[in-house]
Every structure is written in C-alpha cells, then in structure tokens.
Image (spheres, grey):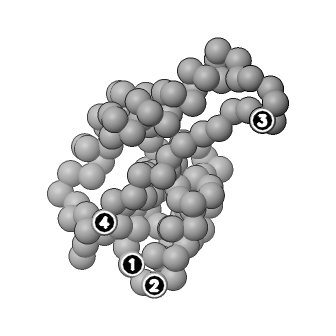
Amino acid sequence: MKSILVIGASRGIGLELVRQYTEAGRRVIATVRDDAGRERVQALGAEALTVDVANPASVSGLAWQLDGEKIETAWYVAGVIRRPNALTPPTQQDFDAVMHTNVLGAMQT
C-alpha cells in the first residue's frame, strides 16, 4: 500500500493533513519532534517517526526509517516562528532557530 508522508505533523497544517488523510482511510507516516506530537499523530491513526528537521543527523535517519516504503505523496510543512509580536525584532537565537528549521531543514530533507 502506498503511503502519505507528512514532514512536520506535530501541530497546525501538518496535523490537519494527517487528520484528513487518515479519515479518508489512507496510510499516513508523519514526522514529529516530541512525545506530545507523537501522541497527537498516533491518536489519529498515523505512524509517527521522530525527526528534527533542524538536525542533519536526525534527517539522515529518516531515510533509514522509510526504507522500503512506497510514498505516493510527501508534504513538507515543518516550520517554526519565534517572535512575540510583529514590532519586536527577533533575537539572534530565535533567528537562527527559524533559519535552521524553515530553510536549512527543507534543504536537508
């Protein structure tokens, strides 16, 4: 059976994709960063894999976890935003976290 892969499924758009595909009877493999995300994804009936897209070693492990899978559709929706409001400039730490997840993570995956 071909699977749907959702990278970045802990919450938001990714979690909603998981919900819609599982409700439609599709097999879904979803990546999450933490136990809370894992619980949400598994509660919807999807298989959860722990992957941090900002960590190259974690991303390279994804290929091993997916070995032999037939992926029909892959969604990359991983992303973070770290700004308390639009008037406050991000700290260097927040900027780096956003770039590592939203830009480098997408390039490495």
Task: Identify the image quadrant of residue 104.
Answer: top left
Q: Say what secondary structure mark 4 lies in.
A: strand
Q: Which tag, 4 or 1, sits closer to the chain's start?
A: 1
Residue at the (39%, 39%) spot, across then down: 106
How far apart marks 3 and 2 lie (CA) works out to: 38 Å
How far apart marks 4 and 1 lie (CA) works out to: 11 Å
Residue at the (44%, 33%) spot, across then down: 103
Identify which residue, 14 or 59, lies in the foreground: 14
Kind of residue at badge 2? Ala
Q: Name the mark on residue 4.
A: none
Image coordinates of residue 22 in percent, x first then y, are: 48, 77
Question: In the rendered image, is residue 38 in sight?
Answer: no
Q: Name the mark on residue 73.
A: 4
Residue at the (65%, 23%) spot, across then down: 94
Q: Name the mark on residue 26.
A: 1
Residue at the (22%, 60%) spot, across then down: 69
Kind of residue at badge 1? Arg
Name the image quarter holding the N terminus. Answer: bottom left
Return the residue at label 3.
86
Q: Which tag, 3 or 4, sits closer to the chain's start?
A: 4
Tell me whether circle 3 and circle 4 mark residues in contact (CB < 8 Å).
no
Q: Which tag, 3 or 1, sits closer to the chain's start?
A: 1
Name the image quarter holding the C terminus. Answer: top left
Question: In the rendered image, is residue 19 in sight?
Answer: yes
Q: Say what secondary structure mark 3 lies in.
A: loop
Kind of residue at badge 4? Thr
| Left or right of 68 on screen, residue 28 | right
